[in-house]
Each structure stands twice: as C-alpha cells, then as structure tokens.
Amino acid sequence: QVQLVESGGGLVQTGGSLRLSCTASGDVDSGAIMRYWRQFPDKQREMVARITKEGLTSFAESVKGRFTFSRDNTKMTVTLEMNDLKVEDTGIYYCNYLTTGGSYWGPGTQVTVSS
C-alpha cells in the first residue's frame, strides 16, 4: 500500500501563485511516475502534469509556461509550482502515484482562483 499526503492549495487572486506538494509513503517504488490531475467545477478532469523518476516532465497545454513540476526521490515528494493563476485553474487537485503495480490517489486539495 502507498499513502499520499498532499499539502498546499487555497484561495488566490488571478495572477497569483500557489504551491502543491505530495509525499508518498509506505511501499513506495522510487521509479513511480507521479502526476497531478485536476477536477473542474463541472466535474471534467484533466491531467495537469507528470514527472518521471528522472525528472522528465510533461504538462497540459493549458498550464505550459505557468506551472513547474519537480521531484525529490529521496523524500518521494513532488512539488507543483503554479504561477500566473487564472480563474479557469480553479478545481480540486489530486496527486497520483503510478507504477505497474498500481495507482494511488491523494485525497485532493482545493485550488480557488478569484478574479
């Protein structure tokens, strides 16, 4: 079993920044791919960012150039830095740990961007 603990999020005005962090513990595999997904108020979901063990990242087109994603393999922690936030970034953000052995999800954290 793997447990994911998320932190960060909250309320910010347009143009502001937030940081989300997620730490995996338990029977972790350092080779796991870590991702952040988000669920919009209309319940649509989008994969926001993805990072491999080697630190290779990919992002949704909607956040490219504004978000960065980093990883500390020694702590099994990932950090999503969100800059120049927009109202359309509002949603619940979920950390996801993915290996061939399974997929685990964090409880989610609310991000609200006000105009």
Image (cartoon, rainbow, N blue to C red):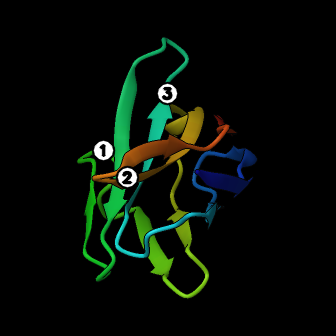
Asked where in the image residue 114 lies, by quadrant, the reply is: top right
Relative vertical location of residue 84 with respect to residue 53 in this rendering, above or below? above
Relative horizontal placement of residue 57, taking residue 67 as reference (left or right): left
Q: Is label 3 in contact with label 2 (beta carbons under 8 Å)?
A: no
Residue picked out by circle 1: 62
Distance of label 1 from label 2 (alpha carbons) = 22 Å
Amino acid type, mark 1? Ser
Relative horizontal placement of residue 62, taking residue 25 as reference (left or right): left
Closer to the chain start, of discs 1 and 2, is 1
Relative horizontal placement of residue 18, taking residue 48 as reference (left or right): right
Amino acid type, mark 2? Leu
Residue picked out by circle 2: 98
Distance of label 3 from label 2 (alpha carbons) = 18 Å
For image coordinates 29% across by 83% down, the residue present is 54
Closer to the chain start, of discs 1 and 3, is 3
Name the one closer to the observer, 67 or 56. 56
Q: Is mark 1 on a helix, strand or loop?
A: loop
Which class describes the residues within 10 Å of circle 1: few (<14), some (14-19), or many (20+)?
few
Q: Which mark identifies residue 81?
A: none
Which class describes the residues within 10 Å of circle 3: few (<14), some (14-19), or many (20+)?
some
Relative vertical location of residue 63 with respect to residue 51 in this rendering, above or below? above
Q: Picture coordinates of residue 110 (x, y %)?
A: 69, 37
